[in-house]
Amino acid sequence: MKIISIFNNKGGVGKTTYMYHIAHILAQKGKTVLMVDLDSQCNLSAYALTDAELERSWKPERGNSIWLAVEQVAKGVGDIRLRAPKPFNSNYPNLYITPGDVLLSTFEDNLGESWTRAIGGDERAIRVQSAVYRYLLWAAEKISADIVMVDLGPNLGALNRCVLGASDYFIVPMSPDLFSIRGTENLGKKLVNWRKEWRQCINAWDGEELAIPQGSPVFLGYVTQQHNVRSTPSGMTNGWNIYGSQVESAVKSNIVSKLQKIGQVHNWNTNTWKLGSIPNLHSLIPYSLNAKKPVFDCRSSDGLNGSHITKARDSIGLFTPIVSKLMQVV
């Protein structure tokens, strides 16, 4: 089982849409996939579940949101709750979700406050820091998952430090714009620093039977998204390509060069870490959101007509090359 986080510390880059579609294709290919919503905005959960299903996931008695999984740890009254993930699409019986919850922001405070104590080996603090990881391990085993895909919020806070530290790999979706490029500058440095601090946690812990994250997620690559397509060498409009042409060098300079030194970059033997490119799908996305299914599964019964039907069906080709690369590591 592999844990893959989808992360960019710059928001609005389409990471949730990307992850939702990739997870469905992986499931099509026979993988059992668990999606976990760790973004307090809960966009992934809203994409997959109805409002009624979401409300049920938040019920303390039987709910299975990620907040309920860690609530007792956050409050200092117990350990993780073992609430099973939920299948949500009968056409994909091997695809599951652990829903998000806006209350998860409460846990972020605990993670921030307990970090220094965890580095010093304090057991309760280490239990707090490892709570999400231990839940992911249990949930994956519960459904025999091959892959856990985690949707993270756009920040470099304590929760993302905790979850990235628990991940085997991470992928960075990016828009070809100035802010996405700027956002790469912090990421590599932060991960190097977090790796050192996680090693301190591990070395300070002398107890038994507690799974602690290694804190060394491997960078698989990036995906450019949301640009407009044109028949140019870059595949983008000239306007989008102003910054699109700078993405690769920024990734190499700010992420790859720093993480390669500590063995946290996957080698594709191509000297590029671009996994794929997903253009702006425009109005197909609202139809997909409303139907609660991937764009490539939307049909006339979901409100599409004319050329939209063909574009929706063919959109799977945008994601397939990315999935082919992921299949090499999972």
Image (tube, grey):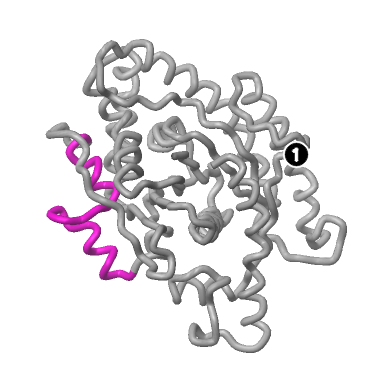
Work out whether 69 lies above or below 271: below
Residue nearer the viewer, 114 or 50: 50
Q: How many marks do you count on the picture?
A: 1
Q: Position of residue 280 (x, y in %)?
A: 66, 65
SS for callout 1: loop
Tell me where residue 43 sits by quadrant.
Answer: bottom left
* Kind of residue sitting beneath label 1: Thr
Crowd band around label 1 with a 10 angstrom C-alpha radius: few (<14), some (14–19), many (20+):
some
Outermost residue toward the front in this view = 30
Classify the position of the N terminus by image quarter: top left
**Which residue lies at the image location 22% right of the left edge and 38% below the top edge?**
80
Q: Position of residue 209 (x, y in %)?
A: 25, 22
**Which residue lies at the image location 60% right of the left edge and 19% below the top edge?**
262
Classify the position of the C terminus by image quarter: top right
Is residue 152 in sight in this rendering? Answer: no
Point out the stretch of residues depicted in magenta: 50-73
Is residue 310 in sight in this rendering? Answer: yes
Tell me where residue 296 sits by quadrant.
Answer: bottom right
The answer to whether residue 312 is magenta is no
Query: What is the chief secondary structure element of the magenta stretch?
Result: helix
